[in-house]
Image (cartoon, rainbow, N blue to C red):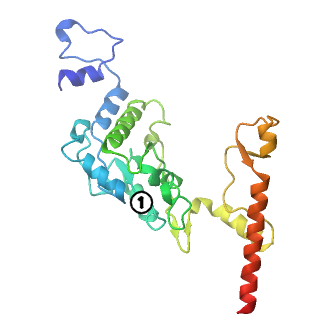
């Protein structure tokens, strides 16, 4: 072990004599454990779209990811520590992504690379693209960009190393893989006419029963952040003070409603003629 490695591990609270500076380090078990993991993270050789080209460029000689201990990309998820979701995640592709994530051994981490993997990107709310991989697997680091540069990905890898440095063996929330009993795998989504998350089956059944009974139902789960819908006039006048406000313009809403009714009327007229 070099003197540089010893300086990384050494806890400065305990002084060491000058003649032993290069031969001795006093540290904690968590610090040694995290140092060994952060210096040997093996990403999975797995790319989805244009962000994968930037990931490949990052792994080339110019950027030298070997200095982070991350130059070994494994083709098998069973030998990988890090899943870099690099590109657009379609509903068809999220099924094998979750399956590969379950095959990775603990401890494992996920890095969402680019706007598509983080939140859907330019395809958000599209018919075949999920709005972020974090809806299906836990994400540790988000790297913004469309696509991110190799420098941005390296910054995300450094952020992951800092997160690993902050974990402690004394806190089971930091190292849940050492808990008692087996860990439950992430439910694999069901691909049919649309993608179904098994964790949302209770909500889906509830909405199906409401639809069968002719009751109004929502297409999405209610947001966790409390929101209040207020008029644009009341918001401008400072009449409402809430943490999160969704402002609705009454004139624009009435115009959208009129256009929807006009489109339905024209469609019915067309069907009656045919």
Q: Quadrant of residue 32?
A: top left
Q: Quadrant of residue 260?
A: bottom right
Task: Tell me if mark 1 has few (under 14), some (14-19) or many (20+) residues whose alpha carbon lies within 10 angstroms of its own.
Answer: many
Residue 190 spot, x, y in % from top left = 52, 68
Closer-to-camera residue (264/156): 264
| Left or right, residue 245 beside residue 147 | right
Residue at horizontal 72 percent and vertical 65 percent from the top: 207
| Left or right, residue 254 beside residue 55 | right
Instruction: List the residue tagged with mark 1.
Output: 97
Counting every numbered tag in the picture gives 1
| The N terminus sits in image quarter | top left
| Left or right, residue 115 beside residue 38 | right
Residue at horizontal 33 percent and vertical 45 percent from the top: 149
| The C terminus sits in image quarter | bottom right
Closer-to-camera residue (241/77): 241
Q: Can residue 185 be seen here?
A: no
Q: Can residue 274 be seen here?
A: yes
Residue 225 spot, x, y in % from top left = 67, 43
Q: Quadrant of residue 258?
A: bottom right
Q: Is residue 186 above or below residue 153?
A: below
Residue 132 spot, x, y in % from top left = 50, 54
């Amino acid at each position: 072990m070099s003197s540089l490695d010893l300086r990384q591990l050494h806890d400065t609270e305990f002084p060491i004599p000058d003649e032993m500076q290069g031969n001795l380090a006093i540290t904690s078990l968590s610090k040694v454990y995290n140092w060994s993991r952060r210096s040997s993270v093996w990403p999975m050789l797995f790319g989805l779209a244009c962000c994968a080209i930037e990931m490949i460029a990052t792994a080339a000689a110019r950027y030298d990811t070997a200095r982070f201990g991350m130059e070994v990309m494994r083709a098998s998820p069973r030998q990988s520590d890090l899943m870099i979701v690099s590109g657009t995640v379609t509903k068809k592709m999220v099924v094998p992504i979750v399956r590969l994530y379950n095959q990775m051994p603990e401890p494992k981490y996920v890095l969402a690379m680019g706007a598509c993997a983080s939140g859907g990107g330019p395809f958000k709310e599209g018919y075949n693209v999920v709005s972020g991989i974090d809806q299906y697997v836990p994400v540790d680091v988000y790297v913004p960009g469309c696509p991110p540069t190799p420098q941005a990905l390296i910054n995300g890898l450094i952020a992951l190393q800092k997160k690993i440095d902050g974990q402690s063996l004394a806190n089971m929330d930091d190292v849940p893989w050492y808990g008692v009993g087996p860990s439950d795998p992430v439910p694999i989504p069901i691909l049919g006419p649309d993608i179904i998350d098994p964790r949302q089956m209770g909500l889906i059944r509830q909405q199906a029963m409401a639809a069968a009974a002719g009751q109004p139902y929502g297409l999405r789960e209610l947001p966790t952040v409390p929101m209040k819908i207020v008029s644009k006039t009341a918001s401008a006048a400072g009449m409402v003070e809430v943490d999160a406000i969704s402002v609705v313009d009454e004139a624009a809403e009435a115009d959208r409603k009129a256009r929807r009714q006009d489109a339905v009327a024209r469609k019915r007229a067309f069907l009656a003629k045919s």
